[in-house]
Image: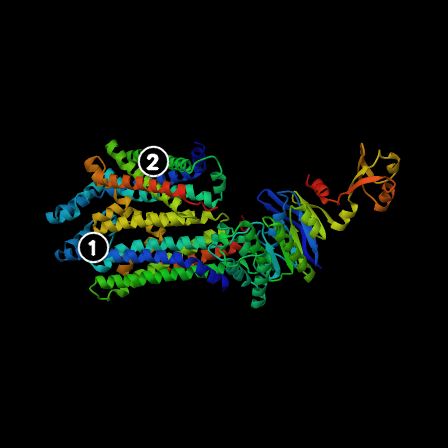
Amino acid sequence: MNIFWQELRFYRKSLLIWVLALSTTLIVFLSSYQSISSQIDVFREVVSHYPKALLLVINFRFEIFYTIYGYFGYILTFIWLAGAIQAMNYGVSILSKEVTDKTADFLLSKPVSRSRILTEKFAAGLSLIVITNICFTVTALLGAKYFSHSNFGIKTFIMLSATLFFVQVFFLVLGFLFGTILPKIKTVLSVALPTVFIFFIVASFGGILDKPDFYYLTPFKYFDPVYIYQNSGYDPKYLFALGGFVVTSLVLSYIVYIRKDIKL
Amino acid sequence: MNMFWHEIKSNYKSLLGWIAGILFFQLSGYSKFQGFKAAQGSSSINVIANSFPKPLLAIFGMSNLNIATLIGYFGILYIFFALIAAIYSGLLGANIVSKEERDKTSEFIYTKPVSRTSVLGAKFFAGLINILILFVIINLSSIVGVGITNSNNFTLTGQVTNLMWGILLIQTFFYCMGIMFASIFKSPKTPTVIIATVIVASYFISVLSELSTNLEWLKYLTPFQWFSAPSLINSGHVAYGYVIVVVILSTIFTGIGWYIFNKRDITVV
Amino acid sequence: MNVIETSKLSKFYGKERGIENLDMQVNEGEIFGFIGPNGAGKSTTIRTILSIVHPTSGSASIFGKDVTKYGPEIREEIGYLPSEIFYYENMKAIDLLRYSASFYKKPKNHMEHRIQTLAKLLELNLDKKIDDLSFGNRKKVGIIQGLLHEPKLIILDEPTGGLDPLIQQKFFNLIQQENKRGASVLFSSHILGEVQRLCDRVGIIKEGKMIKVEKISDLLEKSTKRFKLTTKGKADKAVLLNITGISELVYNGNDINFLFRGHLRDITKAIAKLDLVNLDVNEPDLEEIFLHYYR
């Protein structure tokens, strides 16, 4: 377990910074809730005059938007974006740094198997994500309580907040896969940032273009706050997609890493 | 000029990748417009677009846009091209200077009979060329994309180009900022992280500013709002005030970068 | 003229001492050795005179020109071999060397010829990617890179690490040739034998300060030789009595062991009186002297 603890120690500072960043972003967005929700009456008035057919186009997700769930769900899109960068960063760097920092021959000459290295590193990355999410959910609950001046269902709220975890796991695993496959990654962020944004933009396009098939391509569409609110649960087909991706990537990572020549 | 060509050679493959990304989005981005256009007849789309409370428009990135028009629709796509361009430019600026220290080639290049100014200059201009090429690609592909969607009618080209100037200015802004950070910080990892944070934060602030009238003041803080699609479409040209701001700030950034780069120690191994 | 001259040169990294009030002169045409313990400030000195880092105080000049003001101009005539060689990805050796040559104002075909000649001498395949070369071969690229423009000042930082003994030989010959051609050399190394072989003078740096500068020839003269004798019968102790310059005299059966410093004529006259079966005289070794300073 020494590799595991070493990695946790190494990412301590980064974890702190990210937790603060995510919490700050959340609080900043949440603090605008009042000024936005005050407009719900205006909205209801306007919409009441719309023909039924049109209302179908809009659908009632807008009504939800004005609740704390809906607003939180909206904010989550951006939290996911930031969290994805964090997770992908971890996934890529936790492996690639052995090559960039030239510590590969140190580690690999030790009496450890490559699979143990992978397992402990992945476990460390996962732990960082878990810790981040616990802190985030707590902040979210406190923030929502403070800014919404009303009651809300904690369970549903936590379910919403937990979506961050799933999105982060996706990118952690993806980053991990990149770390095993790509020989040398000099600037982790130059790989992580564009990749995350590509998934983000595909999600936005998919939303605009209204093409549900696209949704499988990007974790940013796996979790619809409205769906979660309505069903108090996650959409199983996307959970399967996520699970499938995670398992496949991890297996692939192991296979590649155990066999490949490490660039020294 | 040898350093200039060396930089061009080192960066072109990456540029090609980004160009491919842009083209990919151009290919897929316009398909929804037909659906929006079809609804136009009933005038209900316009009514909706005009009367929706701000946040709802913001959700769809439709703030202040008349999405029934093609140019308005393109305005939705615009922010994504701006984002891609911003990320490319900011990272390029940060990396092109810091890579010598990152890759430990600093003892090679900085012991050559060239001043740090000439090294910085060669890198700066090589990067600028890359930025311009990406800009031209986004510009041309957008003109073509819009034109084809417009039933092969290219009358909107002028309006598309208006928007494109916004992208060029955003690129320049973040590029010079990236150069500055890389020139200031000794550790090669720092500038990339900072410029990425600034770009992401600028995007978030831009989103926030569209959510409510109380938050509109935020638009002064982010280039994505200085050159936002609605303002560019509605006024027909870039806001000259902001152009001046970008030019001045970019010059200041570059100047600060140049000054500090000459003064500081180069990080070796 | 002094090729390199520093005056109270100091470099502090924040609070960490790099070098402090360093005064150093390297004469034109000499090979100056630069030794000292790890962390003494050798690399800092080199980086400061190359303007990679800026001095905290004091000044340095090369060819009579201040290094901060005239950096690029000075570096036209400097060839630098760093201790660790890193180059650009995906570049072949020949590409890197040509890129390096493109910085200097010397005639292109002349430098190209130099590249080819040196590569042949050092047995380096120029068409290979630098990434694929072994450590020692990368060093060779570094050597060629530092010498291809026939600089007037050559700065070497641990240059022979990783080179096989034959190539090391060739490298030394190369440096000596350059020196004969008129180049001055600043040679930083831990391998005291090399310093002894190549250098005219040696400067010892410790804890950021230059503590001693000596001519190699002086050091050799002043040094002691170790004598090991084996006599046929029991040795006649009277022979070595009263010879000045003998120290650490040890008799062990038929073996006699001692250190001698002084005129060889005196000692050889004395031991000639002994019936010798074996005589060993050790070449003077600077290691003892240097190590004394390292402590």
Q: Amino acid at mark 1?
A: Lys
Position above or below: A252 against C47:
above
Q: Are marks 2 and 1 on the same chain?
A: no
Eyeballing the image, is A57 above or below B231? above
Q: Tag 2: Cα neighbours inside 10 Å, few (<14), some, or many (≥20)?
A: many
Chain ID of residue with mark 2? A
Looking at the rendered structure, the kind of residue marked 2 is Asn
Q: Which residue is label 2 attached to?
A: A133
Name the element at disc 1. Answer: loop
Q: Secondary structure at mark 2?
A: helix
> Does B173 appear above or below C276?
below
Q: Is residue A188 above or below residue A155?
A: below
Residue A61, by quadrant, is top left
Residue drawn at x 24%, y 61% is B146
Q: Quadrant of residue A242?
A: top left
- Chain for numbered disc 1: B
Point 34% across, 42% down: residue:
A252
Using the rendered image of the protein, determine whether residue B237 is visible from the camera's viewpoint. no
With A156 as the anchor, is C49 left or right in this view?
A: right
What is the quadrant of the N terminus of chain C in the image? bottom right
- Front residue of B113 and A258: A258
Give residue B164's mark: none
Image x and y of residue B63, in percent: 25, 52
**Which image quadrant: the C terminus of chain C?**
top right
In front: B16, or A15? Answer: B16
**Image location (x, y in percent) of residue B193:** 42, 47
The residue indicated by pointer 1 is B32
| Residue B125 visible to an observer of this rendering | yes
